[in-house]
Amino acid sequence: MRFTPDEWFEALAFDAYDEPLRARIEALQWEVAARLLTLNIDVILDFGLWAREERDGYRARGAALGAGTEIRFLDVSRAELWARLSSRNANLPPGTFHVDEASLDAWWSMFEPPMRDELERQGSLPKPLPDGSGTSESERP
């Protein structure tokens, strides 16, 4: 089961930029995810996890429930990400919201890409995307 807060915001007609509400939704999604993990049902957390500390925390939570964890990370340049968002913004699919360039820049500066040791821990290092738009190394300073 996949948990994506943006879809809940869309379905409930909430403001996707309401950070206190986002935190509550993510907490609720984790409660449901944790219950599913105890039932041996796979879950995908498609939210946050922008910082190593947060990723480590969810790994520990999963381990406490007897679940393994895995990071799926597509490392694309900021320019490629903006190009994709611009295209998406032009015709927003359901469950998504408009992202302006200033918001992207703010989020980009906060994001901590997974480091090699995090990815090696699970044995799945990122590989370049077939279209060449992704990279296996981060372009961040």
Image (spheres, rainbow, N blue to C red):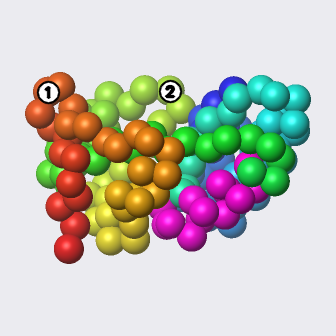
Q: Nearer the viewer, residue 110 or 125?
A: 125
Identify residue for label 2.
Answer: 94
Identify residue for label 1.
Answer: 131
Mark 2 vs 1, N-terminal side: 2
Residue at figure coordinates x 65%, y 54% from the top left: 59
Reply yes or no: does residue 128 show up in magenta. Answer: no
Q: Residue 97: x and y, percent?
A: 45, 42
Q: Quadrant of residue 13?
A: top right
Reply yes or no: does residue 53 show up in magenta. Answer: yes
1 left or right of 32? Answer: left
Q: Which mark is residue 24?
A: none
Q: Residue 128: x and y, percent?
A: 20, 37
Looking at the rendered structure, the secondary structure element under dot 2 is: loop
In the picture, the quarter occupied by the C terminus is bottom left
Residue at figure coordinates x 18%, y 45% from the top left: 135
Q: Residue 70: x and y, percent?
A: 55, 42
Identity, as a three-letter code, of the amino acid under mark 2: Pro
Residue at figure coordinates x 77%, y 26% from the top left: 41
Which residues lie in the magenta part? 50-62
